[in-house]
Amino acid sequence: MASPTELRMDQLPSDPLLHILSFLSYRDLVNCSYVNRRLNDLSKQNPLWKSLCSKHWLLTDVDRQKNDVSWYCLFKLYYSDLGRYIQYYTVLKTAWEQLKSFLQQKCPHIIASLKEGATEVELNNIEAQMRCRLPDDYRCSYRIHNGQNSVTPGLMASMSMSYHYRSEVLLDLETAAEGFQLRRGMKYCLPLTFCFHTGLSQCMALESAEGRKMFECFYPCPDLTDQDPAAIDMFITGSCFSEWFTTYVNNVVTGEFPIISDQIFRYIHDKSCVATTGDITVSVSTSFLPELSSVHPPHFFFSYRVRIEMSSSASPEAACQLDSHYWKITTSEGNVEEVQGPGVVGEFPVMTPGKVHKYTSCTTFSTPSEYMEGHYTFHRLANKEDVFNVAIPRFHMVCPPYREPMVQMQKTSASSDDHEDDGDSDGDSDGDSDGDSDGDSDGDSDGDSDGDSDGDSDGDSDGDNDGDDFVASKPPLPRCQRIQLDLVKV
């Protein structure tokens, strides 16, 4: 019986082998090159590495011609420089290119403020200076662009309303390292952004400490009810740098965040939040303002932007003027409040065919999520007796997830233990030890928890629960440089 024919590797045709090799990762392809001479030759073929260069480094024929090397050598060149970031590079590089392409058309002055990428040596020096490791996704992004120059408006969005302006700059490495924190309450926190008008920063935790998760991104928010400066709550904005940055970029390039007055505004518009009554359409977008909010006491500040448009196909006789507004506000606890008043932000806009009127307003809630709905009342210009209502769609305002600091949780636990042991030593009968008689810990006896004497717990002193005194009395963050600007009509 004849023995079966032995199949040798060097006898196989190249095309099927190349097809098989095309399914391998760059690591497996390199490993194959060590098997024998035939696979070593095949594994370095240009078509294989062209695909891998495109996949991992987003390289094109132009890049190869510029370097005048084979695709295999070009991959090796990029890998020797950026290999540690290979799992992040494509995502972050794509995000940066999309952002620059979009802003080049909309806000070219922001693009001009971007800095060239940092080097590995600069990143290593910053780590040595801080004695703390930077996450690879952060390092990768800063290899592409080292933040931006300190200009206004900043890359990381703006907000403008009466007597308040915010614009966040994406900090460069050197500036961020100068703001690296080792103090209690913000230990091992690196600032990512900074606003020169409000002192607001978004930060990233470089270590798991004080109730924060490693690499988590957040807005710090001082606990205004606690005398301990280490009591800092957190509004969470991302689980890691890459998620934080790419989510923001996606919101910008998809138009989720609008461009207003050549600036990116962090308004979110739910596409279902549109209502049409006759010839008039109303839509609303919302924005949470962490710099004017607090967890303790519970004040959650929102701005909302309303767009009112009359159809261009409406007849001239349909022209009308807005007389008043009505709001129905429902809290997450189910409480309902009704508000009505003349005009909108002091104006009584006239609507004619094709006209669009936009305005911005704000509100403060004591619960982290609420929704508003209502209507505007108009009258026809041709007949003032012809009065009608135009629906305002329901829109939700939800603050980001937040977390209490470890010091606050420890105090809560200790307080619970004290109550269990009835360890009251101040001579009153409320079970606490602050010397008052209302059972809270603010040192007064009016029954509220904000330390004022109005009997409410909203942090203001006028008893109206609108949060206006809270905004004025909230202590500024470090380096805060507050300015006053007139209301921007957007």
Image (cartoon, rainbow, N blue to C red):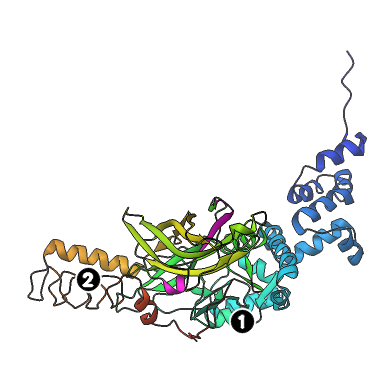
Q: Nearer the viewer, residue 331 or 315?
A: 315
Q: What are the residue bounds of the magenta stretch? A: 277-293
Q: Position of residue 143 (x, y in %)?
A: 69, 70
In the image, taking residue 18 as reference, residue 248 lies left or right, namely left
Amino acid type, residue under disc 2 in the picture: Asp
First reached walking from the N terminus: tag 1 or tag 2: 1
The mark lying in front, picked from 1 and 2, is 2
* Vertical placement of residue 394 versus 221, above or below: above
Q: Which residue is mark 2?
A: 448
Question: Quarter of the image holding residue 69?
Answer: bottom right
**Front residue of 482 and 429:** 482
Q: Residues within 10 Å of mark 1 (few under 14, many from 20)?
A: few
Picture residue at 40% right of the left edge, 58% below the top: 370
The N terminus is located in which quarter? top right
C-alpha span from label 1 to label 2: 45 Å
Please state the horizontal and vertical placement of residue 267, each as a whole percent of the image.
Answer: 55, 64
- Percent x, y of residue 407: 33, 70
Q: Secondary structure at mark 2?
A: loop
Residue 463: horizontal and vertical position, in percent? 27, 73
Q: Secondary structure at mark 1?
A: helix
Residue 242 covered by magenta stretch: no
Q: Residue at x 72, y 65 (%)?
A: 102
Q: Is residue 77 above or below residue 122?
A: above
Label annotation for residue 174: 1
Residues 358 and 68: in front is: 358
| Residue 39 relative to residue 79: left or right | right
In the image, is residue 289 part of the stretch drawn in magenta?
yes
